[in-house]
Image: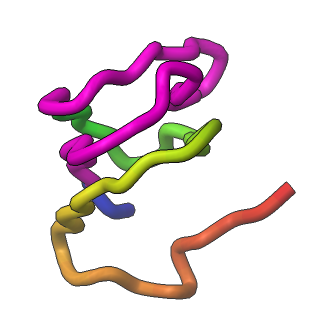
Amino acid sequence: TLTETYYILECGPEARLQLDEDVLALKPGMCVLIRPGVRHRAIGQMTVLIVVLPKFDPLDEWFD
């Protein structure tokens, strides 16, 4: 139910973000909008600023 925005501050060359079945290569300065319901995970080393709207709800997290 949350919209998340990931702003990539730092990352290694292998850093990726998986959004459902798509995998994005990341670089510093990128901003990725993740809409509600999109399964996502970070791959590799990175420092990320994450903005969540509305306020983060721990009940909205799902793990495989």
Q: Is residue 6 above or below residue 18?
A: below
The residue under the point 18% across, 28% down is 30
Viewed as shown, does residue 48 lie left or right of 64? left
Q: Residue furthest front?
A: 12
How many discs mark residues in the rendered view?
A: 0
* 42 horizontally vs 29: left or right: right
Q: What colour scheme has been applied to the protein in the rendered image?
A: rainbow
State which region is magenta: 4-30
41 w.r.t. 49: above or below: above
Q: Is residue 29 magenta?
A: yes
Of residue 50 and residue 64, the one placed in the foreground of this image is 50
Can residue 58 be seen? Answer: yes
Question: Residue 21, relative to residue 60: is it above or below?
Answer: above
Residue at 39% of width from left, 37% of height from top?
Answer: 11
| Residue 8 location (% of width, % of height) | 25, 41
Q: Residue farthest to the right?
A: 64
Quarter of the view holding residue 45: top right
Q: Residue at x 38, y 62 (%)?
A: 1
Q: In the picture, residue 7 is in which quadrant?
A: top left
Tell me residue 18's x, y (percent).
58, 28
Q: Is residue 9 left or right of residue 56?
A: left
Task: Assess whether residue 13 is covered by the magenta stretch.
Answer: yes
